[in-house]
Image (tube, rainbow, N blue to C red):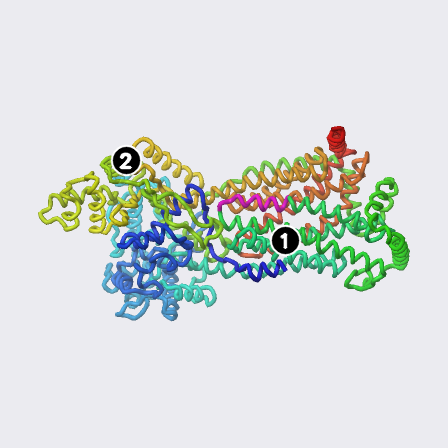
Amino acid sequence: ILSFVGLRFGDFKVAINNSGWWSRGTEIANRATQEMMIRLNRYDLFFDETGEVWEELQSEMQPDWQGPRNDRVGENQNNETEGMGVDDATLTSVCSGEWYGSGDMMSGSNENLFTIWKTEDAEAKDPEKSILDADAMYDLCMAEENTLSALEDGDHCYKCPDTGSCVPPYSLVLMARLHLTGNDISKLDSLSELISCDTLKSTWTAGVQGDFTMALKTCVNWSIRMASDDTKNKDGMITMQNTSIAVTNPCPFPIRFRATVVDNLFPTTLPNIVRYSSSYYATKMSKEDTNGMYEANENDNAYDRSDGTPLSGVYETTDETFQMIYSDAIVGRDMVLAVGSAGVTIIAMVIHTQSPFLTLMGLFQILLSFPLAYFVYYFIAGLVFFPFLNFIGIFVVFALGADDVFVAVDKWKNARHELPYGTTEQVAALALPDAAYSMLLTSMTTAVAFFGTAICPVGPIVCFAVFCGLLITFDYMMNIFLVFPALCLYDKWLLAGSKNCCVNFDWCCGRKVEDEDVFASNTDLALQATATNTDHASSNEEGAHKHMAERNEEERQGLLEDEHKTLIHRFLDGYYIILHKFRWLILAAATAATIGCTVFAAQLTQPANSDVALLPDSNEYQMHWAWKQNLLSNELAKLEGSEAILLWGVEPADTGTHLDPDTWTTLVLDDEFDPKSKEAQSYLLDFCDRLFESFGRVKEDYECPMVQFDGWLKDQSTSDTPTMAYTANCKGASSAPVPSDVFDPCIIAWSKDVNNMSILQVDGSVKVIEVRTKSNVSYDASQKLLKEEWTTYEDWLENERQDSAPSGVDKFYHSDLAYWWFDTNNQMMKTAYGAAGIALFCAAVVVYISTRSFVLTTFAAIAILYVLVAATACLVGLGWTLGFLESVLFAILIGISCDFVIHVGHAYTMYSGDVNRGRRSHFALTHMGPSILAAAFTTFMAAVVMIFTEITFFRKFAVILFMTILHSTIGCFVVFLVLCDCFGPAEPTKAYDAMKAKICGSSKKE
């Protein structure tokens, strides 16, 4: 019923988008949230004459800032052509040539089709091929012509009225055609007709190529100079990659030059070759056009990528929309693989249990855990956001759910072997509490590892952690409620002589006669015992435990010999003989392996940048991103840095539900902000000089709003014809600061007069002032660089707030998306360490509870240490770095790594009294070995199936799961067992029992 209610009324839907992957509720996140509110609504706030927009933003929760733009307040008021795909202003810009090299061409908001080209030997140590070669230029030209034809067929491109055909893309081919026509821009839209691809190839002689290369070098050097610090260029020389370059004449091309057409080695290689280049197509921006282009590229292969010789290309949009569409599409395909892992699990359960009935109950156990977990997730935990990440739980619950089934079935079969003449009730009294206790311990460590990850302030990670933790919890409960009763029915049917193949395969496969006779005899005795004890059913459990307590160890060992007749037990017997015989040698090898893995694992480092790849390296859209990093424009962008925003008048806050991206925040104003006093005005006027001296201007001609306001006052006060805005509002003020009663109307009038949106007001009072400054890092810089830049800014601003800023303007702060992304990564890392600590502590406690022995707990810790360092060493060998995804996965899988050791450690203590360590180790191995191997096999197969997914997070989870289970098996069967066989205590619980007796004795005396 709860499962039905959860799925039927819980508004179940999967969010297959990229929303929510930012930290929320932290200092940096709260700052960025309010800055983003101002940024997205600046136009509407600036032109709001009634105060309605201000009121709505402060009182009504705004939707996800990464969601559809037309959901936000007044978003379409300044973009009447949105959704139409084409507008007259853009068309005019394209056809006049102004679009080429402009910000609109490269802007992500315009979603232009964007191709990256690479020569076939671009990644070689000493590349020789160049896109400037005649054959490569011809191939590039033909590929662009074919792509333009496909764009025309889909009506996705801008067409100039004169020709009615798509305008050519911004690329080396366009520049080459301009070069050959004497840089005549008047016939830009008909260049392809004037100089066809064949003509370009035939005229592209070595001399022409050399002249063109020199022109490119001039443009490149000029671009580098513009991106570099002016103080480094006074002598006309700049240094890049240890090479000095003379900067002389400006770029000769008639269109604006962008360093997207050459790679970052072009300026320093001799001879100058181009390994990577790009083409920008002027395409429409509507959703229908973007989807149409995606379909043409992905499904129809309509866009020419060349054939790889001498170059190859990959397509994307400037906003990386293709990657987002593709990622959303493959989530469903990746989920189909979950069915494959379910099939593997079902087959493994059938083989291991030899009972379709028990397999069916185990399958119900796993399947029901999903809707039950969702019921609690939605109705009790109140989580309405269900990210695609949660579907990893399907793989996890199938793998670990099968483990619980194997443990329960093996515990029952072991109990039946130990009580061959016992009733079903007696066997249940012996097996089920032990199985429930053992599964509780392992389920607890795994669930705690997941729940521990919920300390993360990133919504999808929290939702994933909570949901998977609930899955593990309900899987355990369903095992108790479904599999345990099924085992009782299973046993009763066998005792009744059932030969139904759905109950057990043995009857179908043909049992030996002597085995049938023995089983029949045992069945008769069990039925007689059942009849005899009908009136004493309430004492069955007590009798079973008394029977076991009185049995001597020799009799128990004899009974267990029957258990070892199966193939798996004979294999484990043989393995133990080898382990015991060479135990000291194996111990030395295990020690050396652990030390070696520890050294190798220590080489795991953090990534060089903070970018997170959603798709594998072989995917076209991921290749596009990777190739783009080699363009010179990317390196120049890093030299230029990014833009940081300083805000006065807005408090850092995020008032939305942090675990639901659809509810973002309201605008929170700083009621103490008051810039009217002369002290505040003077501070704001002088502030920017100190700021720019320390960090630089975002642009050479940028001035702070107060500085611009001061200049405007000086100009207006000396003008013979001052504007109405000045005469009506400024009372003759000649410079800042102005009288307090004049400040608001005067500066507001100035902002309206010059259309400066850095000053935002409502009801004649200034509410927000914004200053733009330079940030010297980009969002994908390393965590170290991002942290240094954030700390440097914050320390400088804190000194300003404490020492210089007067009251009313002393609560300002800075923000940048790069810092927000840094905070997201940083919080992920903190989550990983915190969750790992929680998981390790829980694992240690659970191991001690299960073994009641400090010695065995130490052995288990050593085995877990081996698992972690060995798995980490393997990942280092695969070239992994410790990014935030890897960190979170490590934290989660610590809980999984100790499951096998807990089972074996618990079995080691099942003998009471003083029993030889070899005998205990042998019993633990043969008693729990089959279920552990079966669980390892199903988890291996689930991981193998999951490796074939495309989402990077899924694949990385699969790899870590595979490595963890592999080394958990080795850690359990080799490291832990050899430690037990060499040094294991004969009475492992002696200290615990003595302590318990002392405590209980003291309590009784009191």
Quarter of the image for residue 29 reads top left
Identify residue type, mark 1. Answer: Val
Q: Which label's residue is closer to the chain start, 1 or 2?
A: 1
How many numbered badges does the structure rendering display?
Answer: 2
The quarter of the rendered structure image containing the N terminus is bottom right
The circle on residue 690 is 2
The circle on residue 7 is none
Taking depth in this image into account, of 12 and 69 the one nearest to the observer is 12
Left or right of 268 in this view: 489: right
Label 1 environment density (alpha carbons within 10 Å; few <14, some 14–19, many ≥20): many
Label 2 environment density (alpha carbons within 10 Å; few <14, some 14–19, many ≥20): few
Quarter of the image for residue 800 reads top left
Residue 614: x, y in percent? 49, 53
Residue 645 magenta-highlighted = no
Residue 584: x, y in percent? 74, 34
Taking depth in this image into account, of 713 and 407 the one nearest to the observer is 713
Numbered disc 2: secondary structure: helix
Gap between marks 1 and 2 measured at Cα? 58 Å
The quarter of the rendered structure image containing the C terminus is top right
Contact check, label 1 and label 2, Cβ < 8 Å: no
Taking depth in this image into account, of 120 and 661 the one nearest to the observer is 661
Identify residue type, mark 2. Answer: Arg
- Taking the view exactly as shown, the residue that stands out farthest to the front is 1006
Magenta region:
445-457
Residue 156: x, y in percent? 37, 67
From this view, report whether residue 111 is shown above or below residue 561. Answer: below
Left or right of 43 in this view: 662: right
Q: Which residue is mark 1?
A: 397
Q: Main secondary structure of the magenta part?
A: helix
Would you say residue 291 is visible in this rendering?
yes
Residue 305: x, y in percent? 43, 62
Would you say residue 188 is visible in this rendering?
no
